[in-house]
Amino acid sequence: MRPSQVFYKVCREEMKVEKVQQISHHVFVILLAATVRSQVNPEMCRYPLGMTGGQIQDEDISASSQLDSDNGDGDGAWCPDIMSDDLKEYLQVDLRSLHFITLVGTQGRHADGMGNEFAQRYRIKYSRDGNNWVGWHDRKGRQVIEGNRNAYDVVLKDLEPPIIARFVRFMPVTDHSMIVCMRVELYGCEWLDGLMSYSIPDGHQMIYRGLDVYFNDSVYDGASAERLTKGLGQLTDGTWGLDDFLHSHIYSMWPGYDYVGWNNKSFPKGYVETIFEFDHVRNFTSMKVHCNNMFSRGVRMFRQASCYFRSGSDWESDPVTFRPTVDRVSQSARFVTVPLGDRTASAIKCRFHFSDLWMLFSEVAFQSGDDPTHKVDDSNTRILIGCLVAIIAILLAIIVIILWRQVWQKMLEKASRRILDDELTARLAVQTQAFSSHHSSLSSEASSTTNSTYERIFPLCADYQEPSRLIRKLPEFAQSTEHLGPSTSCRALATSGSDSAPHYAEADIISLQESSDGSTYSITAVNMNLFAGTDSSMREFPRQKLTFKEKLGEGQFGEV
Ligand SMILES: *[C@@H]1O[C@H](CO)[C@@H](O)[C@H](O)[C@H]1NC(C)=O
Ligand SMILES: *[C@@H]1O[C@H](CO)[C@@H](O)[C@H](O)[C@H]1NC(C)=O
């Protein structure tokens, strides 16, 4: 087994949390893909690029040499063979496509306490095409990165400026006194622009009120002569300039640092020519150019952009020309979107025309659909979309089932209620007359009070048998309900009071029903008093003898 494979295993376990983040990132990207496929945001673009997601295959990792390939303890790391002075040893990762890399992580070899090898310092080299290699350095020109101080901690380092590359090499810097082992992880996101390089005239120097303001492309990684060629730099570093070009996002840099800018004196034709080369033929929808517009200092956005396209060896003759409305009101820096008319090309040449003394750009980004000949591996995306669709389908199914159940319950309730009502009406109709004459001796205000209380407390029971009818017909009701079946509780209650006077029976009904729920006891007492308070012959049905048969429903004050 190669050390890289072992390393994978370890890292894939260690970084599960980040995998979740990555998935949420993917979801986020899918949801917003239509609107956000523009310039990279370095603060968002910090996802592990291979060791956890499995995007980097073992064959995409190579090394100049290895000392300790696999000693059987499964804690492998890359340990270079001979430590030569001239930084020949490297561990190389191929990301298979261009990536925007904002962060690197390194770790030594711990091997459960057996290993104690790590890289204290290292350098990074990168390449976009696999041929031209560039040594990374920070914004102040420092190439060496401080690495690990022990064998177990993962040390993360921000890459400022970030790297846009397909290949990355880690090169330990050693002092020959110790063996070095490294495990690495890269963080970032895919570079959707597909830009391999841009070529521009280098920026100029402005003297503003005695202050030197430099608009050179200070992080350009290609060749610098009269023109900058074969590299990327500040226009693609994900840092957008401020409204006031004298200030910078980056601490302790010279005035004008965020911008690349030109003075019109050096361009007699009135425009600056820029050339952008891409990884393959693409279908371009638009280009976004971040421009300063501080016209009070002679800086303005371009007044015209003419873009030429090239798929093969020659530039096509018909350009796409775009004239933005030059803002003469607001001095804020802004992205100007240049539509590129879905032109197909692998290179674009744009001429930006001055509208003032100075023209300053801090970022250029391209939006393109891929050429049909280019196959993008979007299997992960498909799986994710599939999962999302499945989740939505399951949720919909659950909602439908819940609604269906509610509809069914309502239908069943209505049906059973109707049956009961019919039966009751039929059975009780005969005796209505007799009871009502007997009952008329009861005080009318008492019965009316009961009615309302009764309805309020036992809405369902009241539903089953209309209270007024019940009160009038209680003795008979007691017997007739024996046959009713479903309304068990009402039947039980009524039976208990069957041989008492009608009003006692009703008091019993209330008390028994109440006693099934302690929380409404006080109301019971009121009702009891109302009917039976003065009559000591009223019998209470022992609660423990009550058998629960069926739940009729729930009301405002509890269960029936
Ligand atoms: C840009 O200008 C600054 C300030 O003069 C200088 O230090 C730096 O080396 C220049 N960078 C490039 C790439 O020319
Ligand atoms: C540069 O721009 C200024 C302001 O718009 C204009 O007056 C001047 O003629 C321009 N110079 C050249 C060489 O185009």
Image (cartoon, rainbow, N blue to C red):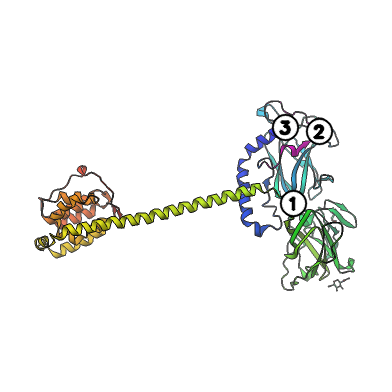
Secondary structure, magenta segment, majority class: loop
> Identity of the amino acid at label 1?
His
| Residue beneath the point at 79% across and 32% down | 80
- Tag nearer the camera, 2 or 3: 3
The CA distance from mark 3 to mark 1 is 33 Å
Q: Give the mark, 2 or 3, whose residue is nearer the N terminus.
A: 3
Horizontal side of residue 125 vs 265, given as left or right:
left
Q: Give the mark, 2 or 1, whose residue is nearer the N terminus.
A: 2
Horizontal side of residue 528 vs 284, given as left or right:
left
On the question of residue 57 being in view, the answer is yes
- Asked whether mark 2 lies closer than 8 Å to ligand 1, one says no
Q: Which mark is residue 175?
A: 2
Secondary element at image label 1? loop
Compare residues 470 and 119 and report the one nearer the observer.
470
Q: Give the mark, 3 or 1, whose residue is nearer the N terminus.
A: 3
> Identity of the amino acid at label 2?
Asp
Can you identify the residue that label 3 sits on? 3
Can you identify the residue that label 1 sits on? 374
The CA distance from mark 2 to mark 1 is 46 Å
The CA distance from mark 2 to mark 3 is 23 Å
On the question of residue 556 being in view, the answer is no
Residue 226 against residue 106 in the figure, above or below: below
> Identity of the amino acid at label 3?
Pro
Q: Which residues are magenta?
A: 54-72
Counting from the top left corner in percent of width and height, residue 488 is at: 23, 49
Q: Ligand 2 is found in which quarter of the picture?
A: bottom right
